[in-house]
Image (spheres, rainbow, N blue to C red):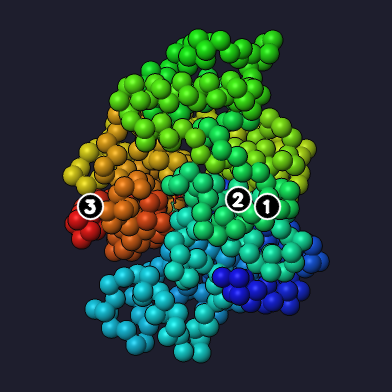
Amino acid sequence: MENRAAELARLIEKKNFVKIVTHIDADGITAGSIASVVLERKGIPHKVEFLKQLDIAAIERLKGEGNPLVWFTDLGSGMLEHLSGLECVICDHHVPSVRTGRKPPSLKREQITDILAFSEAYTSNTTDDDRLQPLQLNPHSFGRDGSYDMSGAGAAYLVGKAMSPDNRDLAALAIVGAVGDIQAARERRVTGTNREILKDGIDAGVLNALTDICFFGRETRPVYKLLQYSSDIILPGLSNHEGNSVAFIEKLGIEQKDGEKWLSWTQFTLDDRRKIVSELAKLLIEKGFGHDAALKLIGEVYELPQEKENTELRDAKEFSTLLNSCGRYKNAYVGYRVCVGDRGEYLDKALGLLRGHRQTLVNCLKTVKESGLVIREKLQYFDGGDRIPESVVGIVANMVLSQNEVDSSIPVFGFTNSEDDGMIKVSARGTQVLVSKGLKLNEVMNITAEKFGGIGGGHNIAAGATIPEKNKEEFLNAAETLIAKQLLKNG
Ligand code: C5P
Ligand code: C5P
Ligand code: ZN
């Protein structure tokens, strides 16, 4: 991957203008920011554009712009076969997918059983003059799983590092991107290439890795809220109970306030933090959740030591949420300005958007509660109608899946109206256990959406699609059949 990154770097460096095109989420914003900073440092003029999704219309528009080079980050690999004729490079981690009926010359349709194999064959068989394959850095092409090994920001970082070792300070943004894509959740720490990037960041003095409670909000939220809103791990009696959460800490004799101000986790003494973790572990074990649940309380957390203490930028998880709050509400540019260093006007704007994001999620969960989940044999779904913005329906699906009362042995689909006329957006979320049993939501979304006039893709554990509304029922049936087949094949 380093060699590939160096090839991309050499190609990019030759250009006198680069158009960066990136995704709107935390990983996309950090990826685009890394690309922008490394070009800035090289003195190469550039522009950044943020896209919700790279579709054919966007590609056609980019072709018309006549840029000397387009640098795709956190997207692109899903649209390989549409990129011929566009001078571009790709830093991505999504599963390369093929959406059209076109097939590589030496492969027969019936030989194509696996999308990834198809894409690789496609890439290696493109001899037609008009189909110059773009240079691509994607962990999937190197036998690695792009859901965990490295994010779009990580791929952009490797290219930056290949341009100059001085760019190692950008490792902090790369880790924020990876954490934003939930790449650290499986092993409760980053692994693979992300781990190498982390080491760079620690060496450069821009990252610390600590073992600590892995709840959201360590730097900025009152501690009882960490317990109250712990959606990854259910804390019996505390999750969703504000009063109980406050009392739990009080009973341990810990002062939670400094005057009128609630203290955050990082403002508690180490002793008090240990006391809370061990009491939480005791609670989980006593209530029969077992040692496994107790172990999940702690994990590796990532701190950005050059950012101010007790701010959203100091903790990678909080930083990534701040960026999602921008990108998912059509303000990716605000997040980008924060990433490239603004700590004034744009940071203030981002913090305002974060407050809005929190409120939106509360409202969306209420909507799901009211409308309910439709439970089918191999999947369950909710329909947000026009009450859940399409840009957050995936986050909501994830939150629903981790709720106490929701059965996590089948995936959750969330539907909502799309901004595109007559279309609906669907987000699908699964669990690690389901993935180990063969679930590949990226294939479900890619193949099924394609079949019913839509477009979809993503990762095995988390994927999305946009489809015509009139095909919703057929889409659900076909998706369910495919999920059943995937799970059956792997026992
Ligand atoms: O487009 P992108 O790859 O950046 O998006 C990744 C998405 O996958 C995130 O929205 C995240 O919520 C989801 N994800 C997840 N569980 C994982 C890994 C990723 O829900 N274990
Ligand atoms: O939109 P959502 O959060 O559900 O996306 C989950 C994952 O699926 C992301 O990685 C996203 O980039 C990908 N996706 C895709 N094509 C779509 C929709 C989502 O590749 N049409
Ligand atoms: Zn990503």
Write down the residue under mark 1: 201
Label 3 residue SS: helix
Counting from the top left corner in percent of width and height, residue 319 is at: 62, 40
Q: In this view, does 4 lie above or below 312?
A: below
Quarter of the picture containing the C terminus is bottom left
Q: Quadrant of residue 86?
A: bottom right
- The residue nearer to you, when weighing 90 against 218, is 218
- Report the residue that reaches farthest toward the right: 43
Quarter of the picture containing the N terminus is bottom right
Write down the residue under mark 2: 175
> Spatial distance from mark 2 to mark 3, Cα to Cα?
35 Å
Write down the residue under mark 3: 480
Kind of residue at disc 1: Gly
Counting from the top left corner in percent of width and height, residue 408 is at: 29, 39
Residue 426 visible: no
Residue density around tag 2, few if under 14, some if 14–19, many if 20 or more, within 10 Å: many
Labels 1 and 2: the sequence-earlier one: 2
Q: Say whether marks 1 and 2 touch (CB < 8 Å).
A: yes
Query: What residue is at 33 percent from the left and 30 percent from the top?
Result: 290
Q: In which quarter of the image is residue 21?
A: bottom right
Query: What residue is at 38 percent from the left and 70 percent from the top?
Result: 116
Q: In this view, does 464 lie above or below 188?
A: below
